Image (tube, rainbow, N blue to C red):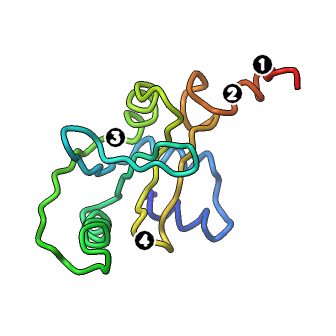
Amino acid sequence: MALVERIAERRAGAGDPRALVGELRRALVLVPVDAGGLWTAEFGGVRWICGFTDEGALARFVRARDSGDGRDTGRAWEFAELRGARLLDEIIPAMDEPAGVAINVADPAGAMLFPPVTGIVPDAVAVDADDIHGGGSDG
């Protein structure tokens, strides 16, 4: 099942969250490249890698980002095509800050966030790993 379909299931309150993460891990994700690096945005203390399931979703993002009103500005954006597992297992741990993946952010009805928590990113970079593994602070 494609990532878009798994996202739709979860947004409808159905489907298995683990299957959704598994689908992201298997999916090829398009990530815009800007100034030599992957395009990210900061929100809520998390650095989000913005990824897209296809060129149409990426184009909607580019139009919204470049013009502010969704019009085509004609600007060409470079992008990398990466397996979701590489984003989660290699790129996020190398970022040295809490980071997750935001999929299809220009599609309000089809967007999905994959936050930096246990079960999505490696435990070593999960923001909740101390709580889950009993290493939390004495409050």
Task: Measure how far apart labels 4 and 2 are at the Cα level.
Answer: 30 Å
Residue identifier under label 4: 107
Amino acid type at mark 4: Asp
| Callout 2 secondary element | helix
Residue identifier under label 3: 83
**Rendered location of residue 62, percent (x, y):** 26, 66
Mark 1 or mark 4, earlier in chain:
4
Residue identifier under label 2: 129
**Rendered location of residue 97, percent (x, y):** 50, 31
Residue identifier under label 1: 135
Left or right: 76 as drawn, with respect to 91: left
Residues at marks 1 and 2 touching, judged by CB atoms closer than 8 Å? yes
Task: Measure how far apart labels 1 and 4 are at the Cα level.
Answer: 38 Å
Mark 1 or mark 2, earlier in chain:
2
| In this rendering, the label closer to the viewer, 3 or 4 | 4
Query: Is residue 98 depicted above or below 138 in this figure?
Result: below
Mark 4 or mark 2, earlier in chain:
4
| Callout 4 secondary element | loop
Residues at marks 2 and 3 touching, judged by CB atoms closer than 8 Å? no
Q: Nearer the viewer, residue 17 or 117?
A: 117
Residues at marks 3 and 4 touching, judged by CB atoms closer than 8 Å? no
